[in-house]
Image (cartoon, helix red, strand yellow):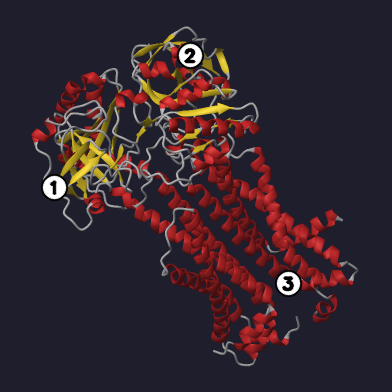
Amino acid sequence: MDIRPIFAALRKHRIPAGLIVLEIALACAVLCNAVFMIGQRIGEMHVPNAIDEAGIVDITVQGTDPKLAAADVPRNLAALREIPGVTAVAAVNIVPLSQSGWNSNVATGPGELLKKNTPNVAQYLFSRGGPEALGMRLLRGRFFDDAEYADSQLGVSYLPGGHVALVTQSLAERLWPGQSALGKQAWIGDDNHYTVVGVVADILRPDRNGEGAAGFHWAIFLPLSPASVLNTYIVRSNPGDRGRVLRDGIRKLEALSPNAVVKGQTFTEVRDKFFADTRSMVGMLALVCVVMLAVTAFGIVGLTSFWVGQRRRQIGIRRALGATRGHIMRYFQTENFLLTAAGVLLGMALAFGINVYLMQHYELQRMPMYYLPAGAIALWLLGQLAVIGPARRAAAVPPVVATRSG
Amino acid sequence: MFGYYFHLAVRSLGRNRVLTALMVLALGLGIGACITTLTVLKLLSGDPIPQKSARLFHPEVDPLPAQGYVPGQSKPPWGGLMPYADAMNLLHAGKAERQAVMALTQAKVEPRQLGQKPFFSDGVMTTAAFFQMFDAPFKYGSGWSEGDGESRARVAVIADFLNDKLYAGRNSVGETIRINDHDYRIVGVLKPWSPQPRFYAVGLGGHSYGNGDAVYLPLQSARADGMDPQNVSCWEAADIKHLETSPCVFVYVWVELADAADAGAYETFLSNYAQQQIATGRFHRPEVALPDVMRFMRDAQVVPDDVRLQAGLAFGFLLICVVNTVGLLLAKCLRRSREIGVRRALGATRRTIFAQFMVESALIGLAGGVLGLVFAELGLWAIRHQPAQYAALARLDLAMFAFTFVVAVLASLLAGVLPAWRACMLTPAPQLKAS
């Protein structure tokens, strides 16, 4: 099809044509960036967390006398273990994604903590049975033995006195890249160091604590004998039982510590709470994208319709001179294609620019290049869809219009 | 004359109902999105204590060791948390009009009534000048004295909502309240008071938005009773049971100066203090900072990036809607060439035509504004049902209400300029000839 007449016609309507181009460019730029952000957020929500998320509940007991913890913790654990359907229990200091931090910088040698850029690491402490209760997955080495739990008391700086640790795969890779972490020493401060006895599949930390996406899996696990800091109980059961297990567990612990404040939730609730903001951001971005595309499409429909109305006479003349309905349809479709092409070209440049700006001012990564053509194709399709209606109406203009005036 | 344009505009808009509806809808959506996100942005970046935010300052020092120090590049760490010793030194130096030290603790409150469960709420551990410095108003009683803190007196000030809950709103001054398993005597009850955000403790833990802190205790008394701060950071292995003497930070200092212009003098004092501490070997880094309330909140990134991004996105969307409206208005005006030609031929000036089209745009803008308001209320309703701490506060205020219409009319006038210009530049003759 000859596109020269289209250019000639567009030249006569520079301003409306320019507006369509501008609108498509803006829509393309916003679309690319918004979809990119949506993808990032959804990716964040699906980072792996190698614990039994569907099977565990956590119950926190606060406001008890810390001096009695050595007796309270085993008593509470025993009570929870009796609940029918419970497969494992343990007391921990913090829970993944719970947003209450317990962090230390971990180094590979003494005196390196402040000198080197050491990773800030979430520090999980748990009583005997911790790996089973959480459902941790061992990749190399071993979990702790009973003696290692029993020998580990909490020191004045809230670090366990034991000498063994588990680390996540990501932390092992961060501290000892390319080497086996087993047998290595992890230093917390200049006085406490722990031998890595096992490497576990990646578990999330309670919060990112400023370490960004890379550090989300940096966690170290230390064994501890019953202590007041182990005030959260992890109770594992079949996913189907956990609602009842949670209710029973809270009731039992409340009965055992009447002065305490007992709160419990399923891990699914913990996760939902952690990602609630992320989820609403995704929802908002998606909503804006959809509405924006709809507005753009209606804009194209509206503008093209008027165009068609204005050119009824020309269309009639063309029809009278032998143009088929298909010719008229294709004329408007091609015109739309050309306008969208100009729009997406401008839009891709704009999208790239916005991404660069966002990278400088916000914690945003570089948008992969394939988003640009993908956005372009989306708008091309949108444009073609939007133009079908008006183009049909144009094609329906009878040749006899040519003989009428006005 | 305006009445006549108005009449013409209504008729013209009525002639193309679908198109008019489309324009109003698009504009309304764009405006609704903008007003929703702007309301949240304004809520989060608002001044929590406008009457004196310029006179309240947050002194910060850097207690970290010499290792890893890069002169000129290091800044006071941990958002300005301070070691206890330095906070007390600044408090006792008394160089400002008022000064207070504070930390947050989780306060377990045990109701006296049988059958009521104990509960946790945010407790502020602070020093005597806190209430006057932050203009916290008292309903009953008053705060405590510096002496009460020094002598570790078990006295407490409680919030209005806690007084309602525990004492049914009566004057509870003199009663005892059991906090973290210790009996405290109530000396004051605050009127409802909750700066949004609770700027003085942003970064200390707890909730930055909501109905405020529940109990206020003298720092020294609460610490003597074993209450732990919510946020502690240590740069060396430290004795957590004796935070006051450990290499740890866990308190904020806030000072009120008589005049914002005194900040320079106080910063010099702070600088000299750091130098003194370097001379005694306690400090190794001379950097200090003295942000005021608004600066402090900016540094603490009180406004989440996502909220800014959302506002940016909403404006991008509004821009698209405006461009869309320009296009549709233009199409409409081109279609009315003949009508314009007739009017011009009958003596209407260019100015008249221009005014007529602008009135039409403004009318669309007003309608878009009304619709935008509906969308904004809808958006804010949705935000109020989000889990964010500030969610419940997201409401349209009068200023935003007015601003909605300013944005709407400005956007539509902006959208109308080009079509109106094209319309008034049409030469009447060819239009008439065509018919």
Q: Which residue is mark 3?
A: B334
Mark 3 touches mark 1? (CB < 8 Å)? no
Badge 1: chain ID? A
Q: Point out the frontmost of discs 1 and 2.
A: 1
Which residue shows up at 58% across the image and 31% down it?
B266
- Which of the pair B105/B336 is nearer the observer? B105
Q: Dots 2 and 3: beta carbons under 8 Å?
A: no
Residue B215 to residue B285: above or below:
above
Read off the residue under disc 1: A183
Calculate the distance from the C-alpha at mark 3 to the C-alpha at mark 1. Answer: 81 Å
Q: Secondary structure at mark 2?
A: loop
Q: Mark 3 or mark 1, which is nearer to you?
A: 1
- SS for dot 1: loop
In the depicted structure, whether residue A304 falls above or below residue A357: below
| Quarter of the figure that contains the C terminus of chain B | bottom right
B117 relative to B126 in the view: left or right = left
Left or right relative to B330: residue A290: left
Q: Position of residue A383 (x, y in %)?
A: 53, 72
Identify the residue shown where x is 40% and y is 15%.
B221
* Badge 1 and badge 2 both on one subunit: no
Residue A2, label in figure: none
**In what element is the residue under mark 3?**
helix
